[in-house]
Image (spheres, grey):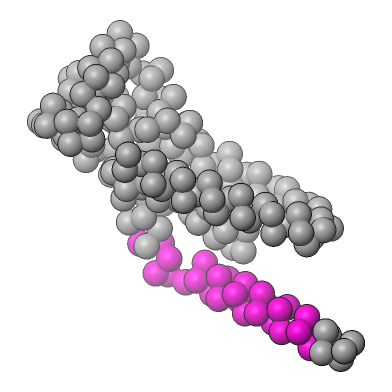
């Protein structure tokens, strides 16, 4: 019985190690950069992907590339923001209707006309629906270059802070994490996966 338990445990460790090795290989490869860029563009436009989870996982296994991942995220955000700004400037009303957010767009447009810079900054640094803010910035006729510089700065800042936490405290967090009971760690992952599924589904409701 003990022998079987040990064997089963080794299998679980090997499985975890294999996954970790694959993640490390992916994080160190060249192709992860364009893939990360595309995912960030999709996530910042209309498709609610759990980008932060991917970003954290890659940073945790490839600390030497954290600032490169931050830069790629900022560039992807700038591209996506420009797309949504352009749609807002040209097709604000039909796009908002497609999202079922006409009233929200009208409110955002009014707010951006009054204090656009602070609102765009808020949209980039928080989990607020930035695609709506970017649409509204285009619809309100907010200066494109001012919009782009604020949004790029805010999104880059958000992920730079997240990257810095992983860079300086990642090992300490991992040590404390490994000390937690297995049931608590599994419970955390169940809650996290459920939250990500809810976030994903609610983006289309």
Asked whether the viewer can see residue 143, the reply is no
Instruction: Report the residue that reaches farthest toward the front.
Output: 1
Residue 112 appears in the rendering: yes
Q: In which quarter of the image is residue 46?
A: top left
**Image coordinates for residue 52, horizontal then vertical, percent:** 50, 48
38 displayed left or right of 4? left
Quadrant of the rendering where the N terminus is positioned: bottom right
Q: Does the magenta stretch include residue 52?
A: no
Where is residue 34, by image quadrant?
bottom left
State the residue at coordinates (46%, 39%).
156
- Residue range in magenta is 7-34
Which one is nearer the viewer's eye here, 177 or 167? 177
Q: Which of 30 and 42 is in front in this view?
A: 42
Q: Is residue 110 above or below residue 32?
A: above
Considering every residue shown, the one lying at the far top of the view is: 114
x and y, in percent, of residue 70 in the image:
48, 48
């Amino acid at each position: 019985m003990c022998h079987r338990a040990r064997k089963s445990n080794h299998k679980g460790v090997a499985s975890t190690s294999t996954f970790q090795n694959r993640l490390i290989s992916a994080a160190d490869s060249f192709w992860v950069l364009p893939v990360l860029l595309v995912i960030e563009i999709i996530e910042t436009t209309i498709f609610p992907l759990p980008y932060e989870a991917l970003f954290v996982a890659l940073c945790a296994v490839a600390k030497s590339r954290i600032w490169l991942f931050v830069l790629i995220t900022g560039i992807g955000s700038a591209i996506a923001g420009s797309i949504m700004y352009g749609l807002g400037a040209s097709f604000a009303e039909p796009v908002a209707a497609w999202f079922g957010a006409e009233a929200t767009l009208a409110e955002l447009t009014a707010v951006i006309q009054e204090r656009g810079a602070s609102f765009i900054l808020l949209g980039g640094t928080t989990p607020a629906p930035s695609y709506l803010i970017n649409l509204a910035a285009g619809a309100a006729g907010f200066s494109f270059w001012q919009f782009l510089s604020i949004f790029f700065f805010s999104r880059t800042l958000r992920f730079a802070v997240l990257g810095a936490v992983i860079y300086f405290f990642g090992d300490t967090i991992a040590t404390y994490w490994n000390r937690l009971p297995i049931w608590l760690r599994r419970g955390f992952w169940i809650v996290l996966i459920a939250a990500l599924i809810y976030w994903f589904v609610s983006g289309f409701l």
